[in-house]
Image (spheres, grey):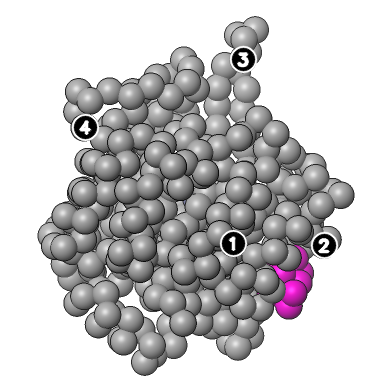
Amino acid sequence: MNRHEVQKTLENKKVVIDGHSHIGISPKFYYQGGIPYALSLEDMIIRMKILDIDYSVVFPMVESLYYKLNLESDKVETSTQYSQFPYEFENRSLLNEIYEIYPQYSSKFLPFFMFDPSREAEKQASFMEELSDKYSVFGLKTATTYIQSFVKDLEGKGRPILDFVYKKNLPVLFHSSVHPQDPWASVYDIVDFAERHPDIRVCIAHSARFTKPVLDKAAKLDNCFVDVSAFIIHCKLAIQNSLAVATEDVRFPGDYNNPASVLSDLIKNYPDTILWGSDTPFYKWIQRYYLADGTLHEERLECNYDEEAKLLHSFPDEIKYKIAYTNVLKFVFGG
Ligand SMILES: [Zn+2]
């Protein structure tokens, strides 16, 4: 089915759509002892069946063969030994897995391309164009923190990708950050980008890190959405006052010990903006790395495989379908 046919099919039946999920591998995470590190499409469909999720927006993980695997340093270096540009292998592999290896499940997935706004945009854009002539693709996703690229580059170096987005009328999902050491994925940059491009549908991932001024501004923009991916561990970060979420002075107010109440308040305040996504398999997060003094540092955020879906299903149908159907469709296909 082409994109238009999928849209028509979805508009005619109320379903639960996960607006944010990944398949593929994360070698660096794996070799550093991190969790998660992999998920296949087959494993994803089994999870969806168990968790009563009908459809999933899905994209590759953030690593790419174009970036050198370096376990000692967080510096991003590139190599054309195996891949000529970012996500060449991963985007092709995603579509191959969905449409060629598991065609029996393909109708359940809305694949998005991964992209890097700061490197080799021309090559990425023409490859995305080529692949989208052959396969149905529903949007783009970027996670600029991990690849040390800049959201703002989409309007500069990344312009060929932005032109592709305009030409195909595709939505763009951005990983977001408020960490002071992260200049790459600022929630403020993303919402400002959405404001400058009213004809592009934009989604800010991870509840915009609970940044109230950004949520307020996104709610005023018809083209800007905020997904609640990995919601439970983000509530845990808020309880810890982690720098990974908004500081208290600008944080959306709520009882973060009770994720259901925070989510309910977000939906009440921003009913047309909030959309549901689980971030599977990144709803749980263990990261390990050595500090300069040789000690092993471990960050550990716990959440079971079914908690995100259970949280969604705990809401009355009207609310559940608003965030996991109506708003997801508006983001993916437009109004
Ligand atoms: Zn994610």
Q: Amino acid at mark 3?
A: Leu
Q: Going from the N terminus, do you reach mark 1 or mark 3 first?
A: 1
Q: Which mark is residue 254?
A: 2
Q: Going from the N terminus, do you reach mark 2 or mark 4 first?
A: 4
Q: Would residue 266 be counted in the magenta stretch?
A: yes
Q: Which mark is residue 195?
A: 1
Q: Residues within 10 Å of mark 4 (few under 14, many from 20)?
A: some
Q: Which mark is residue 83?
A: 4
Q: Amino acid at mark 2?
A: Gly
Q: Is mark 1 within 8 Å of ligand 1?
A: no
Residues marked 1 and 4 touching at CB (< 8 Å): no
Foreground mark, 2 or 4?
4
Q: Which mark is residue 76?
A: none
Name the residue rendered at 73%, 65% in the picture.
216
Q: Going from the N terminus, do you reach mark 2 or mark 3 first?
A: 2
Q: Going from the N terminus, do you reach mark 1 or mark 4 first?
A: 4
* In the rendered image, the vertical position of residue 17 relative to residue 27, given as above or below: below
**Residue 325 visible in the picture:** no
* In the rendered image, the vertical position of residue 171 relative to residue 4, given as above or below: above
Q: Amino acid at mark 4?
A: Ser
As drawn, which residue projects farthest toward the bottom? 12
Q: Which mark is residue 291?
A: 3
Region of the chain picked out in magenta, as a range: 260-269
Measured in 3D between alpha carbons, the distance from the residue under mark 1 to the one under mark 4, in whole angstroms, is 34 Å
Quarter of the picture containing the N terminus is bottom left
> Which of these two is toward me, 5 or 60?
5
Q: Amino acid at mark 1?
A: Glu
